[in-house]
Image (tube, rainbow, N blue to C red):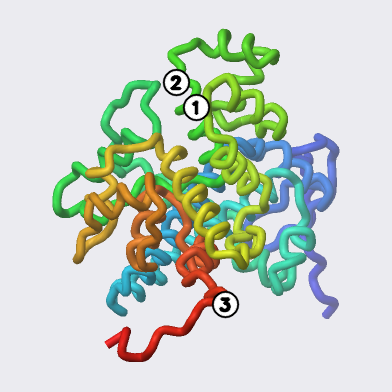
Amino acid sequence: MSPALPRQQIRQCSHCGEDFTHIVRPGRPNTFCSTACRTASRASSAEPPDVTQYAEDLSATAEDLNLAVTTLLATVQDDGDSNTLMRQITDIDRLRKDVEAAIVARARARGDSWKDICRSSGRGPERLRKMWTQDAVTRRLELVRAARASRPAPPAQDPADGPAARTAACAGAGADAETARPPSQTPAQQLAAAMSYLQRSTRKSIKETALDMGVSPSHVSRILAGTRRPSWPVVERFAAVCRGSLPELRDLWEAAQRPLGYEAAGREPAPDDPAEAKEKFHTALNALYLAADRPDLWAVQRISGTGRKVAIGEITRTLTGGHVPDWETTARLVAALGGRPAELRPLWKAAAAPPPRRPDAPELPAAAFG
């Protein structure tokens, strides 16, 4: 007895409309005449990827990760307990995965291949593709957006308010927010914030400032908004018009030129001369103070960490005088002003070193130190 021939049907392709022979088998019937038609149909029916949304997801998750890492560093410098450090590193690991999901989503929406995405990750394309399926990426980013949407909205602020208002808000939030620090900023954002503060201090309009500088108002507006990075000659003209400190603006401008994450290696080596290192140390601290909109010193004290408070007199001497505090105090002040303590540590170490003894200076007897 010969085997029964498979039953066939003539169907119409749901994509191209051509007739094709369909072999009836258990399961869902085939509605496409070829694999090419199936692929083309899925591509045409799929919603176009929202690259803008994925770019916003990446920016937001990267900012959250940056803030978490900065908070971890501040906790380490504050000699925080191990339980707090482990909780923070767990949060960082979760945020890292959020960032990775956003990177994959944006890359795929842009048309990047899996090979291009994983080139520097140490993982193969197939492994990354299986880990970050469309469903996995969508679910994770939906959770991220939901968590971000559930955060309490910040209090309404005047558009002219800058980092100082945020610093004061953190400081006045009560005991539970005693260690709250102002939102982390990139060096480019700190430069824009400092220039914006100086421009507002002149009481001039942006148009008047631009006229005095000899540039267009739109150019100045983009610089102050942080969407345009100025050249150094432009910063020099701005400092002359707005009466800004060239060394402080130079410190911020140079930091903005370095790649993100360059940290201490990006700064020039600290000077060997303690007096020169001391001057550069205070310039760097005052540059951060300027980028934070020169907040009230009591507000800086309240968010400088738990435990032993930094005395107002010590903060004043550090910012306006030649005082170099101990490292714990320095790290608290830098973090309170939105800076990165690790980046200033080599400069602090050189500034805090005792001045070299002159070769002709007589040695004091040991009894003099008793």
Is disc 1 in contact with disc 3, using a CB cutoff of under 8 Å?
no
Q: Nearest the camera: 314 or 289?
A: 314
Residue 341 position by quadrant: bottom left
Verify CB contact (< 8 Å) between mark 1 and mark 2. Answer: yes
The residue that appears at 33% across and 71% down in the rendered structure is 87
The residue singled out by tag 1 in the image is 196
**According to the image, label 2 marks what residue?**
200
Local packing at callout 3 (Cα closer than 10 Å; few below 14, some 14-19, many 20+) is few
Q: Nearer the viewer, residue 105 or 91?
A: 91
Q: Residue at x 51, y 47 (%)?
A: 283
Distance between the alpha carbons at the discs numbered 1 and 2: 6 Å
Is 83 left, or right, of 48 in this rendering? left
Label disc, if present, on residue 360 of the rendered structure: 3
Whether residue 135 is visible, yes or no, is no
Answer above or below: position of 230 versus 43: above
Compared across the picture, whether 114 is left or right of 200 comes to: right
> How far apart in space, not on screen, are marks 2 and 3 (Cα)?
53 Å
The quarter in which the N terminus is drawn is bottom right
